[in-house]
Amino acid sequence: MAQLLNYVDTALFALAPYVAMFTFFLVSIQRYRAQTFSFSSLSSQLLENKRHFWALVPFHYGILVVLAGHLVAFLIPRSILLWNSHPLRLYVLEISALAFGILSLVGLIAAVARRLSNSKVRKVTSPVDAVLYFLLLVQLASGVAIAILYPWGTSWFATSMTPYLWSLVKFSPDVTLMAAAPHLVKLHVFNAFVVIGLFPFTRLVHILVVPNPYLWRKPQVVRWYGLGARG
Amino acid sequence: MNVRAQIGTMFHLDKCIGCHTCSLACKNIWTDRRGTEYMWWNNVETKPGTGYPCQWEDQEKFRGGWEKHNGSIRLKSTGKARIVTNIFHNPHMPSMDDYYEPWTYDYQHLFNAPEGPDQPTARPISMVTGEHIDVESGPNWDDDLGGSPVYAEHDPNLAGLSEEQRRQLFSVEQLVFFYLPRICNHCLNPACVASCPSGALYKRGEDGIVLVDQKRCRAWRSCIAACPYKKVFFNWHTGKSEKCILCYPRLETGQAPACFHSCVGRIRYLGVLLYDAERIADAANLPTEQLIDAQREMILDPHDSHVIENALKNGISDAVIEAAQDSPVYKFVKVWKIALPPHIEFRTLPMLFYVPPMAPVMAQRRDGALDSVSDNLFHDIEQARVPLKFLANLLGAGQEGKVLYALRKQKAVRWYRRALTVGDVDLETARRMLRDADCTEHEAQAIYELTSLCTVEQRFVIPPMLREQAIESLKDPHEQKQNAGFGFLSGPRRGL
């Protein structure tokens, strides 16, 4: 039995992340090459404009901060631990992380409710959207639950998750770090790999085309035959 | 001087009969696809009226166009840094309710209905959801409702009209309206282009047509809010913005755009305008009352040897310069100064111009009966039933002087022609009126001919756009063989 669990852990946390990343890069690039037209945020704001605000704004702000938090803990775990060495600073970080997690979860629930209840928006909801919404709900709900049930995650992420993630980056996955984790954490991590793997098949691809050059470009765009854009 | 060519357009409102043929020609060619049912790239509005989308001219509501800010101009909606905080939800974007929910009728029910005591009916069904809907408004719901307290009274152009003027405009015997056909203005300083976070919108260098690159549009929706004329639309099915393309595939093959070609009243004119692109930024930043003159200044004289020299230097071909010299739009806008840009105070420098409408003739009340012939045959402009202030708000950036000039000249031309052909008015008086209106007899004759006797070739002076030559020099034409149109490798399908 232990052996079997070992296999499962290996499959979920040593194999799945590579499958996910492989699919992510391969399909994203291929989709951008062959189906550039399909890269769109597929906004439904035109069809429903009021609840859109109360769903999409909290969700995006929440998820951006939470993702940024994950990234920071992945990149500079020691600084996080140093910051958390003072209890007050630990509380501040924990509470803000939880607050933004809840913000994004509430936003997502509002978005799902909006999709289900508005007939026009339901019309532009594809089966893939349904799968994506389910996965994101699982991801955000498990994340918020972890923050509540297993406190001081900002610290233990830095001590046990960051080494695991780095072991993946270094192509020598260390499953023992994950094997000891609670089931909820396992669910959260594995579901993240599922989301990454399905990423290029969903509307999430709009993240890949966020408009960063806009802030620096000239306001007017003129294109000439064969010359492309010019001032 | 940086000379560029623009396909300029002009609508002669005095000739528009509000038949909507233009709208239907456009709809049948471009917007009968899924996701575009609610779009009218060309629409005709009744003025006074609220238009489509409802109250589009109210920029306090929709925040379209540009505004003065610290000595320069910025987008009123969400330009530059403000896009970062507003990209998830555009605060000024109209929803489908501001346009209308497109519908068709459940015709099948007429055949499939079970037998009963009543005639079966074809109920309206939404073209978005397919469900039955109660139709409450449509794109042209206030057609001809000049005095309507529901629509006309909420026309944003009524701002600044006195109580007396409003009362007259809405009293039963004075009811008045005219039509305002609208397409994309293909502006010189387009707010939609400036607002696009992805840089998907662009102005074509050679002819000034403003287009959305369908492959680069990511549905950030900024253009829809930024266009003060609300002429960029969101295709809810493909998740891409779409707009009037001035029928460039037709123009490139020497045909007028469909709305122009189908116009029953022959109100539409199209021709090349040469302009100085260097002056765009400065002109758009001037005080409101100087905008109309500044835009006219930017439009260059295609007969001027200095302009021609600079145009050739910029790669504008002889044929295009010749077309510019022949352009009817140039004459109406720059030479005769009787065509005016709509709402130039939005600062996008629109390149579609309107000749303000003369009609209707002032009616007088005599012995309880309406008499449409006043003493001086054609009424005094200042006493027109459409208050000058209203037209000025629409076409003169609020200045009555510009509109008055255009109307006076038109009136003088009418008098002059009346004196020549009917002879019931004095030719000397007509000549005096022409002088007062800053118009020579020669010019009056030219205005008359291009207004009333114009042929297709005179109304549409389409330059050879040489697009195929330009493309063939860069690409093998056979490369696109058997493609699904637009150069896509596959059809433009909605993303997952």
Image: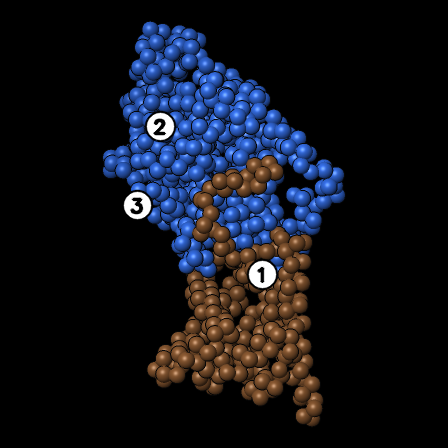
Chain colours: A brown, B blue
Q: Nearer the viewer, residue B163 or B267?
A: B267
Q: Which residue is mark 2?
A: B293
Q: Amino acid at mark 2?
A: Asp
Label 1 to label 2, Cα distance in Å? Answer: 47 Å
Which residue is located at x 43 percent, y 73 percent? A100
Q: Which residue is mark 1?
A: A205
Q: Position of residue B154 (x, y in %)?
A: 35, 44
> Helix, strand, or loop for circle 2?
helix
Any mark on residue B70, and which? Answer: 3
Image quadrant assignment for residue A19: bottom right
Give the letter of the chain under mark 3. Answer: B
Q: Is residue A17 left or right of residue B291?
A: right
Q: Position of residue B315 (x, y in %)?
A: 56, 28
Q: Amino acid at mark 3?
A: Asn
Which label lies toward us, 3 or 2? 3
Which residue is located at x 61 percent, y 66 percent? A199
> Helix, strand, or loop for circle 1?
helix
Q: Amino acid at mark 1?
A: Val
Residue that extends furthest to the bottom in the rendered view of this protein: A1
Q: Quadrant of the N terminus of chain A?
A: bottom right
Label 3 to label 2, Cα distance in Å? Answer: 23 Å
Q: Position of residue B412 (x, y in %)?
A: 36, 16
Of callouts 3 and 2, the N-terminal one: 3
Q: Nearer the viewer, residue B288 or A13?
A: A13
Residue that extends furthest to the left in the rendered view of this protein: B163
Q: Is residue A131 left or right of residue A53?
A: right
Which residue is located at x 41 percent, y 59 percent? B85
User: Are callouts 1 and 2 both on one chain?
Assistant: no
Q: Are marks 1 and 3 in contact (CB under 8 Å)?
A: no
Above or below — where is B143 with respect to B456? below
Which residue is located at x 47 percent, y 22 percent? B307
Q: Position of residue A213 (x, y in %)?
A: 49, 52
